[in-house]
């Protein structure tokens, strides 16, 4: 199994990154927050999970081994495949996901597109004791400057002009400075999409 990749980022798409390792470009599916931390032309190191199907080999990439382990754990639940597991980690950061499972919070889990009430209940029943301990402190929101830099870099990697990317991100953060990186990225992309 390919458990990690380290190499130069060749390109960044909306849902994947291409990382060149030893002359081979690996397409890696990833969450918006993972993609936001990457920059075209720079070296990246990703923890990865290889999902083998009859007709495909798909690599999924994460910033850390913790997210990769949760990705694998989510797929042990009936009805949760790799795409839905990745969507779950795109909407809920690992700490928030663990807290929702530990608290039996169906409302938080059903924020994930594709997970209804029954799916959320199944996740809680099957993963409550397996998801691992919660950190001592609740997940502290990243600072707005750090989020801004990460999202601007991600948008530059997607080919948006610097001024356009910066103004879109600044407008989104001005609405609410406590937003997470994935939320700011999604809203910035939506705003930029309307301008095109």
Image: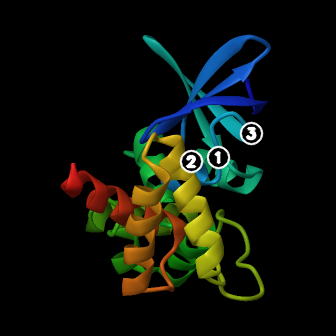
Q: CA distance from mark 2 to mark 1?
A: 5 Å
Q: Quadrant of the N terminus?
A: top right
Which image quadrant for residue 57? top right
Label 1 with label 3: CB-CB less than 8 Å: yes
Q: Is residue 128 visible?
A: no
Q: Which residue is mark 1?
A: 38
Q: CA distance from mark 2 to mark 3?
A: 10 Å
The x, y position of residue 15, in whole percent, is 44, 40
Q: CA distance from mark 1 to mark 3?
A: 7 Å
Q: Which residue is mark 3?
A: 44
Q: How packed is label 2: few (under 14 Cα within 10 Å), some, or many (20 or more)?
A: many
Q: Which residue is mark 2?
A: 35
Label 2 with label 1: CB-CB less than 8 Å: yes
Which image quadrant for residue 128? bottom right
The x, y position of residue 7, in whole percent, is 77, 29
Q: Is residue 68 visible?
A: yes
Q: How is the image coloured?
A: rainbow
Write the residue at 61% across / 45% down.
Answer: 72
Q: State left or right for residue 47 relative to residue 160.
A: right
Write the residue at 61% across / 65% down.
Answer: 149
Circle 2: element type: helix
Q: Which mark is residue 30?
A: none
| First of labels 1, 3 by sequence position | 1
């Amino acid at each position: 199994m390919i458990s990690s990749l380290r190499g130069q980022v060749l390109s960044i798409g909306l849902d994947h990154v291409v990382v060149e390792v030893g002359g081979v470009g690996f397409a890696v599916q990833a969450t918006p927050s993972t993609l936001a931390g990457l920059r075209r032309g720079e070296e990246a190191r990703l923890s990865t999970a290889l999902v083998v199907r009859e007709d495909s080999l798909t690599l999924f990439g994460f910033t850390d081994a913790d997210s990769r382990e949760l990705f694998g754990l989510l797929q042990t639940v009936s009805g949760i495949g790799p795409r839905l597991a990745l969507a779950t980690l795109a909407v809920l950061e690992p700490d928030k996901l663990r807290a929702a499972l530990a608290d039996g919070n169906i409302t938080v889990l059903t924020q994930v597109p594709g997970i209804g009430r029954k799916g959320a209940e199944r996740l809680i029943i099957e993963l409550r004791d397996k998801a691992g301990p919660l950190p001592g402190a609740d997940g502290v929101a990243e600072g707005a400057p750090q989020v801004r830099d990460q999202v601007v870099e991600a948008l530059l990697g997607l080919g948006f002009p610097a001024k356009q990317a910066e103004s879109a991100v600044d407008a989104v953060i001005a609405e609410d400075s406590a937003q997470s990186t994935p939320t700011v990225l999604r809203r910035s992309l939506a705003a930029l999409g309307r301008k095109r």
